[in-house]
Image (cartoon, helix red, strand yellow):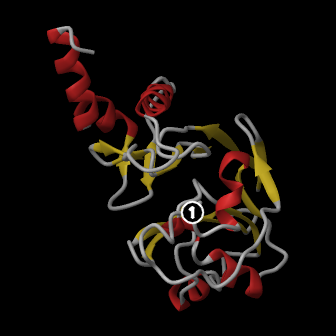
Amino acid sequence: MIVKTIPMGEIQANCHILIDEKSGDAAVIDIGECSGVLIQSLKDEKIKNIRYVLLTHGHFDHIDGVYAFKKIYPQVPVCIHEFDAKCLEDDLVSLRRGFGLPASEGKIQADILLHDGDLLPFGDAEIKVIHTPGHTKGGVTYLIDDMLFTGDTLFCLTVGRTDLPGGDPSELNDSINRLFDLPGDYKVYTGHNRSTTLDRERTGNIYVRRRKRKEKTGNV
């Protein structure tokens, strides 16, 4: 598997292009902007079939390019968890209006509504959907092989914010623990900034260190 990461849009959210070299299948994970760089990257000779647009959650900086992308690739299904699906249709729900930005280019509906545990065929493998709310109600992590695509749930040495509508610290705590409980190590491709590994986050993440300090003082 190959992963190409392109920061895009107003807040430079990471768009990840996942490519299975054997089958030629590709998936685009989060599209903050339908840029020329993205379209050119999808002309890679290794890509024979763009199988999915996979959205980790519905905030505008991760979905703003989806409408324009679907104009170019109407056959590619857009996948998002059912709890965040309205973000594709409503600038208020996606927080675009809340950040004082102009109206989005257009509205679309999701082609596939995701649920926890869903398996999406991809080459000879499957992409597993793990519901990881806390940053948003419909946040998900995508797992395939030894890779996790965590969106704004888990970052390198920190975690996603919970102070926006739909955020919930308790849910995020459960989601982080669920990821940390996965067996073995994984490469973690995040929604912003650089990638990391699950082992690194289990020991060095500031969120984990804060939790340990609270446990020692009895202030959990």
Q: Quadrant of residue 21?
A: bottom right
Q: Quadrant of residue 79?
A: bottom right
User: Does residue 79 appear left or right of residue 92 in this picture?
Assistant: right
Q: Disc 1 designates what residue?
A: 94
User: Does residue 121 appear left or right of residue 203 in this picture?
Assistant: right
How dense is the environment of label 1, judged by Cα within 10 Å: few (below 14), some, or many (20 and up)? Answer: many
Q: Is residue 69 visible?
A: yes
Q: Could you say which is closer to the camera, residue 58 or residue 151?
A: 58
Instruction: Please provide percent x and percent y for residue 185.
Output: 43, 34
Instruction: Please provide percent x and percent y for residue 108.
Output: 76, 72
Q: Could you say which is closer to the camera, residue 150 or residue 108?
A: 108
Question: Which part of the image, by quadrant, shows the C terminus?
Answer: top left
Q: Could you say which is closer to the camera, residue 66 or residue 109?
A: 109
Residue at 50%, 25% (x, y): give it.
Answer: 183
Residue at 51%, 64% (x, y): give it.
Answer: 95
**Residue 34 higher or lower than 12, as above or below:** below
